[in-house]
Image (cartoon, rainbow, N blue to C red):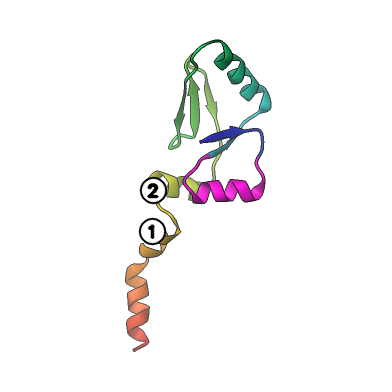
Amino acid sequence: MVIAPSFADIFYNNALKNGIVPIKMEESQINEWMQKAKDTIFVLWVDLKHQQITDDEGKVIDFNIPEYHKEKLLNGWDDIALTLLQEDKILEYENSRN
């Protein structure tokens, strides 16, 4: 997981393809968390399924991620795994070509 105010499109898409969750967050919120982390051990919990981050004070922040990418990340699917989900259709097509 990487939390930042913004991401370049290439980085954002490559991160998702590599199983890294890029979370766009308001800079003021990031600064607040960074300040707290300077003074003590600070913990964040990320709930990808519900698209929420909870800090160790119980504050919950929602974040957005496209449903397609969320499903891939939750299931551990990469592009090859997605292709293999269509294996029956691929085999059907290959058999129809013979």
Going by the image, does 92 lie left or right of 10? left
For mark 2, what is the residue? 76
Q: Looking at the picture, tell me which residue is in the foreground, 28 or 36.
A: 36
Magenta stretch: give its range. Answer: 7-21
Label 1: how many Cα within 10 Å (few below 14, some 14–19, many 20+): few
Dot 2 or dot 1, earlier in sequence: 2
Amino acid type of the residue that numbered disc 2 sits on in the rendered structure: Gly
Residue 81 circle label: 1
Q: Residue 43, relative to residue 93: is it above or below?
A: above
Name the secondary structure under disc 2: loop
Query: Does residue 15 belong to the magenta stretch?
Result: yes
Q: Main secondary structure of the magenta part?
A: helix
Q: Residue at x 60, y 20 (%)?
A: 34
Q: Looking at the picture, tell me which residue is in the foreground, 2 or 61.
A: 2
The picture places residue 7, in percent across and down from the top left corner, at: 65, 41
Q: Residue at x 54, y 26 (%)?
A: 61
